[in-house]
């Protein structure tokens, strides 16, 4: 029974150790940065301390009695617990040294060196103590040297089981519930429990155990023991053991498995995060599953140590582990990936049960591999115990070797292997390492049949490794965990997720960065989540810079946290600022941003720009530099590590870095976030910047503008500084044509922010609940009403004077302009409302009505829009533009009979109006009804003989009648009249294709796409052309883009199916 109590104590120690590791890593990265380099430094210091403790502890334990070893074990646990309690104070004491070495981001190699030394100083005592507990536990618990490997493996197993429980508790329960301080307290309680068990155990059994031990003889002593007087004088010892010395084989195996273990863990964490989403739950699930499997394997391996064929058992174990790793790699890029993606696609609301299933499936892939690695540990310990060396000392050294190899594997994997060869090949290298060890073992296996069996298994693993298909990296990095559910059911999922051209793909140390070009737009994604684009995100990216810079009376120094596409930086540089520091954590993002030169004008080449590749929070925390403007544009808070940029401590660090009158602009998403979480973020921001204001950009991007003083008196500066050279032009590009456009984004000041935040819980470094609640919102718990709730806050009557004046001056033209701005931002519901307001004020404006029809169609509000138009026509029956708009909306809804009827009504009421005839002609042309089209074309040519519209529909009529030469001549005349009319180029392409002029057809279609990259029909037409030429891959990609714009396109669906029959693989 006493032995079981000790195993319980060592399990509790493992639980505490992993809790400490999680908490310390979080605290240290908050102080030193969330970069891979900072996290790796913490890992290196942690594992280095374990190694030192194990080696030193092993040498020291060999000289102790078992009772003293147990007492010292208890003392080590106390040291670890006290260190855990003191850790926050130690980190604060370290901060001045970090600030000194950082030197405002110019510290070069000094800062990483000081960071490493600082980590070692802070972690050396507790981690060395943790590492020393293993040899002390072995010395105190193992009574029979013949069972040293089995018992040592058992100790490792129970300790690792405790670690798995610690990973589960810390990652899923403790930190979100009680914060870092409370979680540390749980660890201290677990350490205390271990001490409370071990001390009585040592007292009650120490004398008996020593007596039993003294009566035993052993070929492999647990310790050297005190030397006798005779041995001191003569130097003679006991006879050397007769068993083979496999110490260095065991040490080599533990080094290889330690390296492979951490390599697998790092890579699988990355892969699983891209498959199920890079949230804290993905990391916690991976860690828990891996450690649990290691523990289970160690239990099994400790039983295997009873065999006399240790070398053979170890070789078979590692060969099977290599096979399991290869099969897991095969499944990860194939069956598992597609299963999870289709689950996401079939589930518009992702339940917690489904998410748990996905995490279990993904993490479960690692279990057989980790199980094998765990089994190898006690078997390798048994080999290390051979040769007559003191067992405790041997175990301490090889455990230290295992720890050093583990951290080496993690560092090489993150900084060298993944960036150089990618995730899949890095996994393969780890498997090859295991196979090399298997071959090394095969040479030493005495039996020929055992040798043949081991080689056959290794050969099987090698064959599987060679035949493993390459992963579909584009599909893995497509963000299916987020975007699959938005793919229409009639569109092939993989085709939709991979549509477009991959312009950049890089697996970096911190994440996988991609840039994709699709239907005229470019997007930058990190681990599948799009963080910047040249389409709907442009207004937010530009407003992030322009809004605070216009509000500030004289901005000189600017800091931007997050580079992204570089558009925000480019907009900041439009202003006459002196310097802009941009802090970007990912070198791959910096590289990828240069692909956005058309939209960002190469801002990194501006002499005013200073690029700092590092952690934004660390820069603001450690720098002494002050800024007039700080712009924080992180990714969504549900992504692992990002929530640290939404805490009260972060905002306080921002406030400390602002000059007098300085302004912060903080981006927050209102999508994929719960109502409670968004209110919590606003409450946290307002607790530091009580005079802040809120601005809702586009459909769902919230900008929080704060300062040490009230922001509202600065609102007039927007108009005063609007004429700053380049500012208006830059904003015009995204539809902001005048100051009204910016003022109209204002949704509240301090009073509204306070009312909205209510009693929202503050996010703090210690209790960062957003990191845990955020992912749940992403998978179905997010509020779709957040933006509407924010818009409802504004009361124009009590708004600040500039805002009230702006809304009072809002006429039809301004509402139309705002609708166009929202349309460009892809905020279709808001655009619909704005166009609707403009239409009520001016029902005859063609631009407004065109926008109204487009926004109604894009937002799925056609029935409501039809009712509005019919209601307007009942009041204004003679308004031509309303009849044309009604016809267009009917046509867009597929109600062609009603569309024709409305267009004919327009022609009847206004027979000489171009707009009426053009609308009627467009319907007949789209329907392919040449007989009905002909009289309309005659009327167009009679009334408007030299207009582009007349020539275009004349060409369309000739095309429908099969008179292609005549159609081509008319199309060319139309192009001469208006070279910017994309439909004419598309028509010319179709005519050339029918004439067999494939080169000219391709050129014409490509011209059409350059003019209008959002036209599904042109992509489908060009795809059909490529299909006819046997260019299956090109055709398939074009059909995929067509379907991304119009999932109902039958020609694209049929063309894609035909391309696949001929070998196209999306």
Image (cartoon, rainbow, N blue to C red):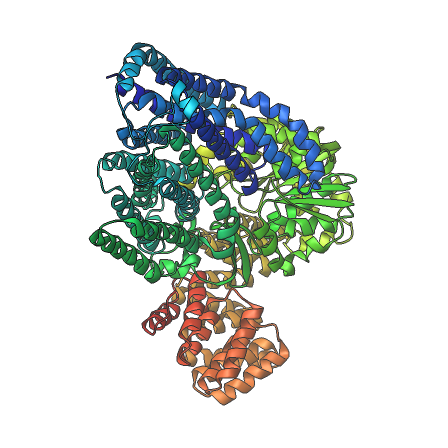
> Quick check: 697 above or below 395?
below
Q: Position of residue 931 (x, y in %)?
A: 42, 81
Instruction: Classify residue 940 by image quadrant.
Output: bottom right
Query: Looking at the image, which is closer to me, 316 or 277?
Result: 316
Q: Position of residue 524 (x, y in %)?
A: 54, 54
Query: Looking at the image, which is closer to me, 694 or 919?
Result: 694
Q: Position of residue 484 (x, y in %)?
A: 39, 52
Q: Is residue 752 visible?
A: no
Query: Looking at the image, which is closer to me, 903 or 824?
Result: 824
Q: Position of residue 268 (x, y in %)?
A: 40, 46
State the count of labels: 0
Q: Is residue 847 visible?
A: yes
Residue occupying the point 63% across, 27% down: 94
Assign the C terminus to one quadrant of the image.
bottom left
Instruction: Classify residue 658 by image quadrant.
Output: top right
> Quick check: 185 above or below 479?
above
């Amino acid at each position: 029974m006493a032995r079981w109590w000790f195993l319980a104590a060592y399990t509790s120690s493992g639980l505490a150790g992993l809790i400490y590791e999680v908490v310390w890593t979080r605290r240290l990265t908050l102080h030193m940065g969330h970069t891979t380099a900072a996290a790796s430094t913490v890992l290196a210091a942690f594992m280095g301390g374990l190694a030192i403790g194990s080696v030193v502890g092993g040498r020291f334990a060999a000289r102790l009695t078992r009772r003293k070893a147990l007492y010292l074990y208890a003392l080590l646990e106390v040291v670890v617990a006290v260190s855990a309690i003191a850790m926050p104070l130690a980190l604060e004491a370290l901060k001045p040294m970090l600030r000194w070495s950082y030197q405002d981001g110019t510290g070069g190699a000094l800062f990483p060196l000081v960071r490493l030394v600082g980590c070692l100083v802070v972690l050396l005592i507790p981690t060395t103590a943790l590492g020393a507990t293993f040899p002390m536990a072995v010395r105190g618990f193992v009574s029979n040297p013949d069972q040293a490997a089995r018992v040592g493996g058992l100790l490792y197993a129970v300790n690792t089981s405790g670690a798995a429980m610690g990973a589960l508790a810390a990652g899923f329960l403790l930190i979100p519930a009680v914060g870092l301080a409370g979680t540390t307290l749980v660890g201290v309680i677990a350490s205390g429990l271990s001490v409370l068990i071990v001390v009585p155990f040592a007292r009650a059994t120490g004398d008996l155990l020593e007596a039993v031990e003294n009566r035993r003889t052993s070929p492999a002593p647990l310790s050297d023991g005190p030397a006798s007087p005779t041995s001191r004088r003569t130097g003679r010892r006991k006879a050397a053991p007769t068993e083979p010395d496999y110490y260095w084989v065991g040490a080599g195996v533990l080094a290889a498995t330690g390296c492979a273990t951490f390599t697998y863990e790092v890579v699988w964490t990355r892969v699983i995060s891209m498959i199920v989403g890079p949230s804290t739950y993905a990391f916690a699930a991976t860690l828990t599953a891996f450690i649990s499997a290691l523990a289970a394997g160690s239990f099994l391996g400790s039983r295997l140590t009873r065999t006399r064929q240790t070398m053979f058992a170890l070789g078979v174990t590692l060969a099977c582990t290599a096979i399991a790793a290869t099969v897991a790699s095969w499944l990860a890029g194939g069956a598992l990936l597609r299963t999870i993606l289709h689950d996401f696609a079939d589930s518009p609301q992702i339940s917690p049960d489904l998410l748990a299933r996905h995490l279990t499936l993904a993490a479960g892939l690692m279990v057989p591999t980790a199980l094998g690695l765990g089994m190898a540990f006690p078997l390798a310990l048994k080999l290390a115990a051979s040769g007559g060396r003191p067992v405790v000392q041997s175990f301490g050294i090889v455990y230290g070797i295992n720890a050093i190899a583990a951290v080496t594997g993690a560092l090489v994997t993150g900084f060298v292997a993944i960036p150089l060869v990618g995730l899949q090949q890095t996994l393969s290298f780890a498997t090859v390492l295991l196979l090399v060890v298997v071959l090394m073992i095969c040479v030493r296996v005495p039996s020929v049949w055992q040798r043949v069996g081991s080689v056959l298994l290794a050969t099987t693993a090698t064959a599987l490794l060679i035949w493993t298909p390459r992963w579909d990296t584009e599909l893995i990095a497509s963000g299916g965990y987020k975007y699959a559910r938005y793919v229409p059911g009639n569109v092939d999922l993989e085709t939709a997720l991979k549509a477009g051209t991959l312009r950049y793909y890089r697996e970096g140390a911190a994440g996988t960065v991609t840039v994709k070009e699709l239907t005229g737009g470019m997007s930058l994604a990190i681990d599948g989540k799009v963080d910047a684009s040249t389409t709907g995100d442009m207004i937010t990216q530009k407003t992030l810079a322009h809004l605070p810079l216009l509000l500030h009376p004289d901005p000189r120094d600017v800091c931007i946290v997050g580079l992204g596409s570089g558009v925000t930086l480019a907009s900041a540089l439009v202003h006459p600022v002196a310097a802009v520091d941009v802090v970007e954590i990912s070198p791959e993002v910096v590289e990828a941003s240069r692909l956005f030169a058309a939209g960002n004008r190469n801002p990194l080449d501006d002499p005013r720009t200073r690029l700092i590749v590092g952690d934004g929070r660390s820069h603001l925390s450690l720098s002494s530099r002050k800024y007039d403007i700080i712009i924080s544009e992180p990714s969504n808070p549900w992504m692992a590590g990002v929530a640290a940029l939404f805490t009260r401590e972060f905002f306080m660090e921002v406030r400390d870095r602002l000059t007098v009158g300085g302004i912060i602009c903080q981006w927050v998403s209102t999508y994929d976030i719960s109502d409670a979480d968004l209110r919590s973020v606003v409450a946290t921001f307002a607790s530091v910047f009580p005079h802040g204001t809120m601005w809702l950009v586009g459909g769902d991007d919230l900008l929080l503008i704060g300062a040490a003083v009230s922001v509202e008196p600065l609102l007039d500066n927007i108009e005063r500084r609007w004429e700053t050279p380049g500012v208006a032009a830059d904003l015009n590009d995204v539809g902001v044509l005048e100051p009204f456009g910016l003022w109209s984004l204002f949704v509240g000041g301090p009073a509204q922010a306070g009312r909205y935040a209510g009693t929202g819980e503050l996010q703090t470094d210690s209790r960062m609940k957003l990191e845990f609640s955020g992912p749940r919102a992403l998978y179905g718990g997010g509020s779709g009403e957040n933006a509407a709730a924010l818009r409802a806050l504004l009361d124009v009557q009590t708004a600040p004077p500039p805002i009230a004046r702006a809304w009072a001056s809002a006429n039809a033209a301004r509402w139309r302009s705002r609708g166009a701005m929202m349309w460009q931002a892809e905020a279709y519901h808001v655009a619909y409302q704005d166009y609707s307001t403009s239409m009520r004020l001016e029902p005859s404006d063609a631009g407004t009505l065109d926008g109204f029809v487009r926004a109604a169609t894009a937002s799925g509000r056609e029935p409501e829009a039809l009712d509005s138009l019919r209601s307007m026509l009942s009041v204004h029956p003679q308004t031509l533009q309303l009849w044309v708009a009604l016809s267009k909306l009917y046509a867009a809804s597929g109600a062609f009979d009603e569309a024709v009827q409305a267009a004919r009504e327009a022609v009847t009421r206004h027979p000489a109006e171009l707009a009426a005839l053009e609308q009627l002609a467009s319907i007949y042309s789209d329907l392919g009804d040449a007989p009905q089209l002909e009289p309309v074309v005659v009327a167009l040519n009679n009334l408007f003989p030299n207009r582009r519209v007349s020539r275009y529909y004349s060409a369309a009529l000739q095309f429908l009648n099969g008179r292609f030469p005549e159609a081509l001549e008319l199309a060319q005349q139309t192009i001469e009249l208006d070279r910017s009319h994309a439909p004419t180029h598309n028509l010319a392409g179709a005519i050339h294709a029918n004439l067999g002029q494939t080169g000219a057809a391709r050129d014409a279609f490509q011209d059409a796409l350059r003019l209008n990259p959002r036209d599904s029909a042109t992509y489908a037409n060009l795809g059909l052309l490529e299909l006819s030429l046997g260019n299956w891959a090109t055709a398939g990609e074009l059909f995929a883009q067509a379907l991304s714009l119009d999932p109902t396109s039958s020609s694209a669906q049929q063309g894609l199916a035909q391309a696949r029959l001929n070998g196209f693989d999306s």
